[in-house]
Amino acid sequence: MIALPGFGRESLLFLHGDDGPLAAQPFVDALRAGIVTPTANIVTPTCPGWTEEPVPVWLRTVDQLAYHYLDAIDRCATAPVVAIGASFGAWLLLEMATKQPKSFSALVLISPVGVKLTDRETAQFTDLFARDIADRASALYANPEDALRRLALLDDHEILGLAVAQAAVARYGWEPYLHNPLLRHRLHRVTCPTAIFHGADDGFVASLDYYRRLATLFGGPTWLKTIDRAGHRVEEEQPMALARAVLEFLSDVR
């Protein structure tokens, strides 16, 4: 059972991306520093599979995860929730918001995956498991050399965390690769204000037009915002700029 300890009326829910909570920590810290309401806080659960704790054999799809998080929200929240998700976490939020639209008052989707808009023969997302470390960095970051330098500085515990994260992504997103074929047909059910943030140099998606086309499928008001000097991992490369843009959006819609 997923728990959301500390979740209150003004809490923001943040669902981490593919690399896990550690990679997103500078972004979360910048968000916390920019929140001016003293009673607000950010709840950052770690998704099952991104720790060394065993995961039930039957828990294998993002669809199943979505219901577990919705159950946690139903137990804790007394009003619709503001939620932020990065990449895999954004996919999870879309699954949740199409199932229970009234549970959310606003969504922030950072480099969302989960939806395939290309034709049958064209991949929507780069196959990370078929590439070496350098090629992966080129697909994910605007500055792959800097990303590789950061990787070289990680200690053994942090390297293990990344390996566990990659296994979790494969568990939930291997087949079909990083998308739910049915999700695009349900996106009209997302009716709350929604912002999509993506990097100007995102080489992970087939085309940056993916984000524009995705934004047209929602049933509520949608904003599309680009973050300069960032690839797919916006929260890792530009945590301060992203946090400022997210807080500006939330101040406009709350």
Image (cartoon, grey):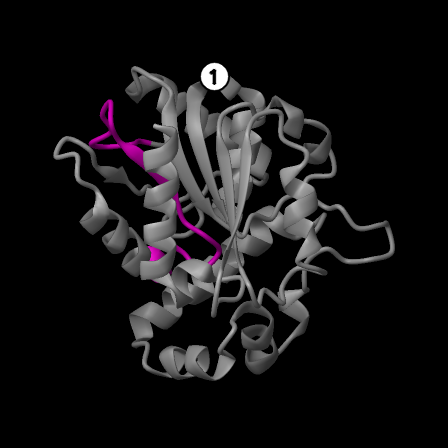
Which residue occupies 70% across, 54% down?
Answer: 209
In the image shown, does 191 or 114 lie closer to the viewer? 191
Q: Is residue 206 visible?
A: yes
Which residue occupies 36% across, 59% down?
Answer: 241
- Crowd band around label 1 with a 10 angstrom C-alpha radius: few (<14), some (14–19), many (20+): some
Q: Which residues are magenta?
A: 3-24
Residue 3 position (above or below residue 129): above
Occupied quadrant, residue 64: top right
Q: Residue furthest front?
A: 252
Q: Residue furthest left?
A: 38
Occupied quadrant, residue 218: top right
In the image shown, does 130 or 28 lie closer to the viewer? 28
Q: Quadrant of the N terminus?
A: top left
Tell me the kind of residue under disc 1: Lys
In the image shown, does 65 or 57 lie closer to the viewer? 65
Regarding mark 1 in the picture, which secondary structure is present there? helix
In percent of width and height, residue 107 lies at 45, 34
In percent of width and height, residue 164 lies at 44, 60
Q: Is residue 179 visible?
A: no
In the image shown, does 218 or 119 lie closer to the viewer? 218
Magenta stretch: includes residue 131: no
Q: Quadrant of the C terminus?
A: top left
Residue 201 position (above or below residue 68): below
Can you identify the residue that label 1 sits on?
102
Magenta stretch: includes residue 8: yes
2 sits left or right of 206 in the view = left
Which residue occupies 52% across, 20% down?
Answer: 101
19 sits left or right of 115 in the view = left
